Image (tube, rainbow, N blue to C red):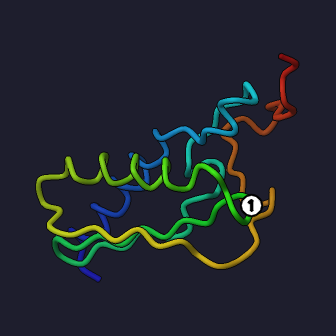
């Protein structure tokens, strides 16, 4: 893989983490898609981008919203000619969460 694609993948991964998961936001513990472990893989090949995501649960009601946010964000990249967002089969589990603060309390806040 060439260095430019690697830099672009890292840039996209950071940008995708700026998209907050709707459920974590509703629970008062907002996490970006990357921190929550929803972004399974980002691949750049020239101007073609593939983003693979794994929803936190089968039948996620917000998957369309998440896909749309990814599309809007990636379309802003001048070098991106084509985007494919794929839903990955598999079971998400909490071990995929990457928390910047290991002492962070991720339990839902009372509403």
At horizontal 55% and vertical 38% (from top left) the residue drawn is: 20
Horizontal side of residue 87 vs 37, given as left or right? left
Number of disc labels: 1
Q: Position of residue 59 (x, y in %)?
A: 69, 63
At horizontal 28% and vertical 67% (from top left) the residue drawn is: 83
Task: Tell me where residue 104 sits by quadrant.
Answer: top right
Q: Position of residue 54 (x, y in %)?
A: 62, 66
Q: Is residue 6 above or below residue 35?
A: below
Q: Nearer the viewer, residue 3 or 26?
A: 26
Horizontal side of residue 67 vs 72, given as left or right? right
Residue picked out by circle 1: 57
Task: Tell me where residue 38 sits by quadrant.
Answer: bottom right
Task: Tell me where residue 9 sits by quadrant.
Answer: bottom left
Q: Position of residue 40 (x, y in %)?
A: 56, 68
At horizontal 81% and vertical 35% (from top left) the residue drawn is: 106
Q: Is residue 111 above or below residue 80?
A: above
Query: Which residue is situated farthest in the bottom direction here?
Result: 1
At horizontal 71% and vertical 77% (from top left) the residue drawn is: 90
Quarter the N terminus occupies: bottom left
The local secondary structure at tag 1 comes to loop
Q: Nearer the viewer, residue 108 or 7?
A: 108
Q: Position of residue 73 (x, y in %)?
A: 31, 46
Quarter the C terminus occupies: top right
Badge 1: residue crowd in 10 Å (few <14, some 14–19, many ≥20): few
Query: Which residue is situated farthest in the top direction here?
Result: 111
């Amino acid at each position: 893989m060439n260095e430019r694609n690697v830099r672009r993948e890292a840039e996209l991964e950071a940008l995708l983490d700026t998209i907050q998961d709707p459920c974590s936001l509703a629970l008062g513990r907002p996490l970006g898609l990357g921190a929550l472990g929803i972004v399974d893989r980002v691949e750049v090949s020239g101007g073609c981008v593939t983003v693979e995501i794994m929803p936190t649960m089968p039948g996620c009601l917000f998957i369309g919203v998440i896909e749309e946010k990814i599309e809007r964000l990636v379309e802003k990249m001048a070098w991106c000619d084509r985007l494919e967002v794929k839903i990955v089969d598999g079971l998400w589990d909490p071990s995929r969460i990457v928390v910047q603060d290991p002492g962070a309390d991720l339990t839902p806040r009372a509403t």
